[in-house]
Image (cartoon, rainbow, N blue to C red):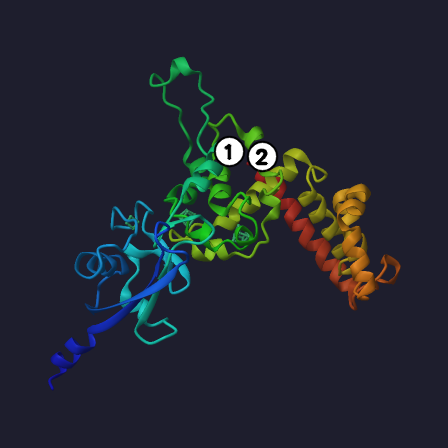
Amino acid sequence: MTDSSKQHIEEKRDVTFRVHRFNPQVDSKPYFDDYTIKLEKGITVLRALNYIKEHVDASLTFRAFCQAGICGSCAMRINNMSKLACTTQVWDELERTREPNVIRVEPLRNLPLIKDLVVEMDPLVGKMQQFSNWVDSKMPEEQWGRKEFLVSEEEFRKYDKATDCILCASCVSECTILRANRDYVSPAVLLKSYRMNVDSRDASHEQRLAGLVGDHGVWDCTHCYRCQETCVKHIPIMDAIHGIREDAIERRGVKDTSGARHAEAFMTDIGKKGKLVEATLPIRTNGVAWTLKNLLPMAFKMVIKRRTPPPPLLVKSTSGIEQFRAEFREMSGHVAKDHEKKSGE
Ligand code: SF4
Ligand code: SF4
Ligand code: FES
């Protein structure tokens, strides 16, 4: 066999797509269908799905439009990771499959399922409406279309990357907090909100921020970085989340929300002892009344199971605490300087 025919064989393979199926009109629960097709190297997952729909099973339902990574409509989970089907190469996926030559294709998570690979985007759009994810112009209406509203290049750089978001919802699908609580604001909405809040043309900054620090808002994020790792446009979503938190503390103070108070109590403990004083953390975060009402039953269970955290007086400082405190003070000093620099900009 010549080298070129060997290469030709290597570049053509039978690939099985294990695709999530669910038609609410006939199915009581979701299942998977296997479609095995012969493919050439260079083909994307979306083209393979199009082939299956055209030649194997016309009932397979998925969403796609631009086929160029622009519209965001073909986002789905491929081999357990949310991504765009139109920019995902089958050959790349074959290298990371659990079962040889089998690619698993599922709908996005954390959004209601409509059919097969299609999810409902309305909850995400609803949150964007709730947090006014648009520029609410400061310019008087009579001047619209008559006068330019200029933005400096320096200002634009602050939200340049955020404007790349194509609202594909891949980050939403991978968010660990949304898995537990669908009311959570979501990484995509935090990113858009940050982008609007740093835009000098916008008039809704305070109102938007007030919503973002409320229940199920920015303080619920656990900093797991999963959204950022998933983003199909490589947008630093965590910078936006940190930006909103810093802005909230600066404009509204640390006593404003339980999240901010929790962060403050956390920093105080770490600064003093190098570890958390867990027994009093809920009281310092949410107050005595809230703690008694919400945590008393759990506290009883913990006492019975002998799992209570040690009382504050028994929490000893970690070893090498002096050195740690010096480093902590130095780090806090750098952060304070950064804040001063940013607010002076
Ligand atoms: S970092 Fe926050 S927003 Fe991003 S996935 Fe984790 S919990 Fe969700
Ligand atoms: S932030 Fe990234 S992953 Fe999330 S919706 Fe926008 S483009 Fe998609
Ligand atoms: S079809 Fe538009 S991003 Fe994939």
Work out which residue is located at the far bottom of the displayed protein and give it.
1
Image-quadrant location for residue 318: bottom right
Mark 1 highlights which residue?
A: 130
Residue drawn where x is 22% and y is 59% of the image: 57
Q: Position of residue 339 (x, y in %)?
A: 62, 42
The tag on residue 155 is none
Q: Nearer the viewer, residue 139 or 117?
A: 117
Q: Is residue 24 left or right of residue 131?
A: left
Which amino acid type is shown beneath numbered disc 1?
Answer: Gln
Q: Is residue 283 left or right of residue 236?
A: right
Contact between marks 1 and 2 (CB within 8 A): the answer is yes
Image-quadrant location for residue 326: bottom right
Which amino acid type is shown beneath numbered disc 2?
Answer: Gly
Q: Position of residue 49 (x, y in %)?
A: 25, 59
Q: Position of residue 44 (x, y in %)?
A: 25, 60
In the structure shown, which secondary structural element does the residue marked by tag 2 occupy?
helix
Q: Nearer the viewer, mark 1 or mark 2?
A: 1
Visible residue check, residue 277: no
Q: Position of residue 77 (x, y in %)?
A: 38, 58
Does the beta carbon at disc 1 come under 8 Å from ligand 1? no
**Callout 2: 10 Å neighbours few (<14), some, many (20+)?**
some
Q: Which quadrant is the C terminus positioned in?
A: top right
Q: Is residue 51 above or below residue 71?
A: below
Image-quadrant location for residue 106: bottom left
Q: Is residue 188 above or below residue 8?
A: above
Q: Is residue 199 above or below residue 67?
A: above
The tag on residue 211 is 2
Q: Earlier in the sequence, mark 1 or mark 2?
A: 1
